[in-house]
Image (cartoon, grey):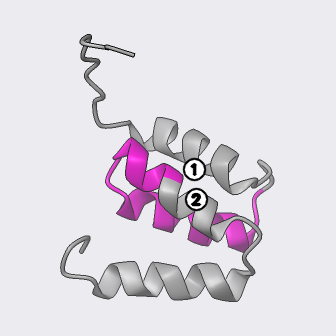
Amino acid sequence: MNCKKEIQLGILSKDEAWVLFRGKAGLDDDSSTLNDVAKEVAAQCKGLPLAIVVVAKALKGESLNGCTTVNQRFKESKTFG
């Protein structure tokens, strides 16, 4: 496969990032504490599609405690903070 066409991926808006994150993490659209924490985690990905997909898939099926731990680690991280 000799692909030469480049496609620019921009930064996603907050709403676009949440839709992508929610879909990859398997979250429903109901408001809940888990969704609130997941929205914070999605925001920590700074609209970067690859980061959103990787983190969302890693958190798929996690409990509120697991999501809260990841959110706290993001906040403490020098890379993402």
Q: Position of residue 70 (x, y in %)?
A: 50, 81
- Residue at which label 1 appears: 21
Does dot 2 land on a helix, a strand or a loop?
helix
Residue 19 percent across, percent down from the top left = 59, 40
Residue 28 is situated, as x and y percent measured from the top left of the image, at: 80, 51
The image quarter containing residue 23 is top right
Q: Residue 39: in sight, yes or no?
A: no
Residue at image position (81%, 53%) is 30
**Amino acid type, callout 2:** Ala
Residue at 31% x, 14% y: name it: 3
Contact check, label 1 and label 2, Cβ < 8 Å = yes
Relative to 45, 27 lies left or right:
right
Element at label 1:
helix
Q: Quadrant of the C terminus?
A: bottom left
Residue range (magenta): 31-53
**Residue picked out by circle 2:** 56
